[in-house]
């Protein structure tokens, strides 16, 4: 039977209808391979093919990098531009001020993120933190989005494992809605809505995928996509920047487990993930709780979803979580 | 130079960056063909392969149909179910009450919507109105979404030209945001925001694609997708149901022109369109203005857009409109 479910944070309704499509094997999977020229610009030895390095992790004395951050060669927003606001009649514009960076996660062209060791993943997460701190020095930037596209149907255009950072002069819509929802919940309940969700997930148990000391992964009650999975710190924390060394290590171990469960369960799917963290200089850290949302790309969005904002999801989250737990 | 632009109705920001991708020939186009079994269930003579007919247009004495509406064989929501609401701790559910119908737009398997004559298109739009009126009798239904997926990358699974109707027990998020934005604008300005947009489009001219007596098409100032095009009645009207015979004929002629411009300009792209009209029994018709949004499927959404709600668009709307005008 189809069911309509409401997301407790932003109030978005979704339809879950598992009558015709349900288990991992039922999904049509697109090839995750991306077009690859003969020469990968992200491989060691070709550092001159990227714009000048912004930051890197080098572990050995020979200066070989393990993680490397460079400006995106085709940036969506540019750092050099002056921030200018303009009106055109009833219409508003801002110049495209911001930053767009690429984090190359490994020197090894043939490793996916799921193949990285927890130790290697920890270097990537620490690099995210360093870039967040560096970009936070620019007061004109209000939000920094960290995300990854893996596989061509998730929008990747380069095969070598990498994630991206886009810094924005305003808080974007989806994050703003989450923050407003969380602030409203805090106002009416006096508690963090994400902490309450975690409590409910631990109580209901059937949507849990995996837990360790510091982190929990679950398939949210009202997902937008089949097998959507959220990774959340068990303890309240508004900003990913504030995660300490032990936390980074816990996250890396947990994330490695989740990435490998997805890879096994869904036959190495294309996916996107994005980090939702508090905006720069956010004044109400009691309200917000950072997390990572992972979306395997198993179905296509259709006109109905674009036109209405109502997602139709073919798998109940408790079924998705069970498949992921058993993988 | 990239530019951030704000949608005047819902306040959504978008990034427009045309540095690297701009004209119709620059887009990678996926094949719009869909998998087709040997036997099309929508062709004349195979009426028994669909669920029982809900409505149809028959023009000749032999009873051959020209447009035919049937229940979707794999419905997202079901009409038979009782509407039940339930709470699970902090989580809300409603049973999946609603309707999901298919409008087969032509008996000719080989015709796309762009190939239909204005007279044939008028029959399709009249059929939409008849279904809206029939479904409006069920007071439990709050909103009726009409949309079309054309081509596999737009989510179509059957080749024979058809559109879909989904009736919902609540107003979905995107429509609700538009209505709330329009009501807020009306409260502060005393005017319809869509009428003001039309005035600005006629004044600026460079985003106009085509106009006739009753309708105007333009590429909106802050689009979410390249070559996004809106079709809007020139005169204020909240509900598509209220469009009269002359209006239907004007719309059909105008829509045929736009469909063919898109087909020529973008080499027969996959696309989605959806009708945004007032909810059932909407009490503030001065605020809302129905329209059709057409989204050619030229680029893939990426993790960044899903994670932030911020779309990055590679073509300025005045460029898109010029290409469409010249096609």
Image: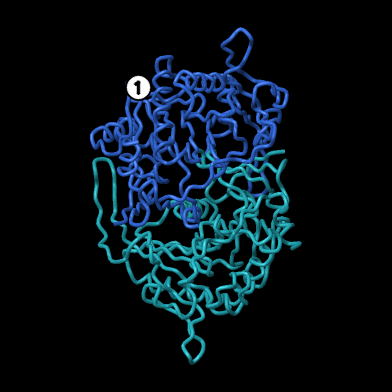
Chain colours: A blue, B cyan
Residue A293 drawn at (x, y percent): 44, 35
The answer to whether A259 is drawn above or below residue B179 in the figure is: above
Residue pointed to by mark 1: A214
Residue at screen point 36% across, 48% down: A23
A67 horizontally vs A263: left or right: right
- The answer to which image quadrant residue B91 occupies is top left
Residue that lies at the very extreme toward the right in this rendered image: B326
State the quadrant of the C terminus of chain B.
Answer: bottom right
The quadrant holding residue B246 is bottom right
- The residue drawn where x is 41% and y is 25% is A238
What element does badge 1 sit on? loop
- Of residues B272 and A79, the one nearer the viewer is B272
Graded by Cα atoms within 10 Å as few (under 14), some (14 to 19) or many (20 or more), the crowding at tag 1 reads some
The percent position of residue A244, horizontal first and vertical second, equals 43, 15
Q: Is residue B190 left or right of residue A82?
A: left
Question: What is the residue that sits farthest to the bottom in this orientation?
Answer: B61
Is the residue A160 above or below the residue B26 in the image? above
Please identify the quadrant where the N terminus of chain B is shown.
Answer: top right
Choose between A273 and B146: the one closer to the eye: A273
Where residue A42 appears, x then y in whole percent? 64, 27
Check the residue under mark 1 and report the chain it is in: A
Q: Is residue A289 visible?
A: yes
Q: Is residue A186 visible?
A: no
**How many numbered discs?**
1
Q: Residue at x 67, y 45 (%)?
A: B314
Instruction: Please determine whether, in this image, residue B298 is positioned above or below residue A221.
Output: below
Q: Looking at the image, which residue sits at the far top? A: A61
Q: Position of residue A210 (x, y in %)?
A: 33, 30
Q: Is residue A59 above or below residue B182?
A: above
């Amino acid at each position: 039977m189809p069911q309509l479910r409401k997301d407790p944070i932003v109030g978005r309704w979704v339809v879950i209808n598992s009558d015709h499509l349900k288990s991992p094997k039922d999904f049509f999977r697109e090839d995750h391979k991306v077009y690859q020229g003969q020469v990968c610009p992200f491989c060691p030895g070709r550092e001159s093919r990227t714009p000048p390095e912004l930051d890197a992790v080098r572990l050995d004395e020979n200066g070989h990098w393990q993680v490397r951050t460079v400006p995106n060669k085709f940036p969506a927003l540019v750092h050099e531009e002056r921030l200018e606001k303009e009106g055109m009649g009833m219409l508003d514009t801002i110049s495209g001020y911001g930053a767009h960076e690429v984090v190359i996660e490994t020197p090894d062209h043939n490793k996916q993120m799921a193949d990285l060791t927890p130790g290697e993943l920890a270097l990537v997460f620490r690099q995210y933190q360093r870039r967040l701190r560096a970009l936070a020095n620019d007061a004109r930037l209000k939000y920094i989005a960290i995300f990854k596209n893996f596989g061509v149907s998730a929008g990747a255009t380069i095969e070598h494992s990498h994630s991206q950072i886009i810094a924005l002069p305003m808080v974007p819509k989806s994050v703003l809605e989450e923050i407003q929802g969380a602030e409203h919940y805090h106002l009416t309940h006096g508690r963090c809505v994400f902490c309450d969700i975690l409590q409910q997930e631990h109580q209901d148990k059937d949507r849990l995928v995996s837990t360790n000391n510091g982190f929990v992964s679950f398939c949210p009650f009202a997902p937008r996509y089949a097998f959507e999975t959220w990774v959340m710190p068990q303890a309240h924390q508004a900003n990913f920047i504030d995660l300490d060394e032990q936390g980074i290590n816990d996250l890396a171990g947990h994330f490695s487990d989740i990435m490998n469960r997805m890879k096994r369960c869904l036959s190495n799917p294309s996916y996107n993930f994005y980090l939702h963290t508090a905006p720069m200089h956010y004044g109400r850290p009691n309200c917000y709780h950072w997390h990572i949302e992972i979306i395997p790309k198993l179905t296509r969005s259709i006109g109905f979803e674009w036109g209405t904002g109502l997602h139709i999801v073919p798998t109940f989250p408790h079924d998705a979580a069970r498949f992921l737990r058993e993988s």
